[in-house]
Image (cartoon, helix red, strand yellow):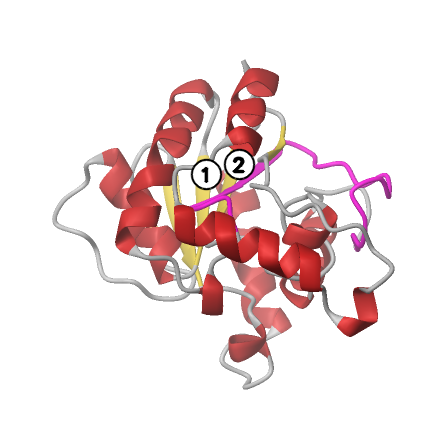
Amino acid sequence: MQGELNNRIIACGRCPRLVAWRERVAREKKREFRDWEYWGKPIPSFGNLSAHVLIIGLAPAAHGANRTGRMFTGDSSGRWLYRALHKAGFANQPASERRDDGLRLIDCYITAAIHCAPPGNKPLPSEIANCNQFLREELDALRNLKVVITLGRIAFETYLKTRGIAPLPSFAHNRRCDFNPVLIASYHPSRQNTNTGKLTELMFDAVFAQAKAVL
């Protein structure tokens, strides 16, 4: 099921704005990555469907996953995430810059609210809705889940709405909601949050420590 689902994700072209943007970025490239052959397609999810922990991000970064072809690989957010995952025992190494670098997730699965890089890192509500079927299928298939970690408010609200949970609880960093599976909210490890000190390594590590405590 997982391979078939990821193949459908990669082949998706439902959102013309996102298709145009991801392909334009892949053609024009960033100067420091001019020698790369950009992925330039929707980014498949990463991990094993037997996992007990699910991480939901917002969207691929234009010059991160949209370049490398793997979730949270090759950008600053990914450096924060994989360092924290490795420290908590959910990844076999603390960094990931290429999709062939040997990184393996341990009892963990990573997806996103949308699978294409959006302009300005801001997907439209209609684009999130177009991509939501993939998340619904993943939630149905992830039958061993005990913990869901959402990175940022959009991922938090997208997950809750997908689950049909209402009213929505308020968003706060490291907030635990005792649903089944347990939901833990986190600030997104974007530069906007990490460079300003809104999210520190200690704060981010606390999210995964709480997830381990649940397990």
> In the figure, residue 102 lies in which quadrant?
top right
Residue 198 screen position, x and y as percent: 49, 80
Q: Which element type, helix, strand or loop, lies under badge 2?
A: strand
Residue 33 screen position, x and y as percent: 81, 64
**Which of the numbered marks, if any, corresponds to residue 40?**
none
Identity, as a three-letter code, of the amino acid under mark 2: Val
The Cα–Cα distance between marks 2 and 1, rounded to whole angstroms, is 5 Å
Q: Say whether residue 167 is left or right of residue 65.
A: left
Most frequent secondary structure within the magenta stretch = loop
Q: Residue at x 44, y 27 (%)?
A: 138
Look at mark 2 in the image and give the residue it sits on: 53
Residue 108 screen position, x and y as percent: 60, 36
Q: Neighbour class for label 1 at 10 Å: few (<14), some, many (≥20)?
A: many
Tell whether position 180 is magenta: no
**Residue located farthest toward the top when viewing the structure as drawn:** 1
- Magenta residues span 95-116
Q: Residue at x 78, y 73 (%)?
A: 31
**Which of the numbered marks, if any, corresponds to residue 147?**
1
Q: Can the viewer see residue 85? A: yes
Q: Say whether residue 207 is left or right of residue 86.
A: left
Q: Which element type, helix, strand or loop, lies under badge 1?
A: strand
Q: Nearer the viewer, residue 209 or 107?
A: 107
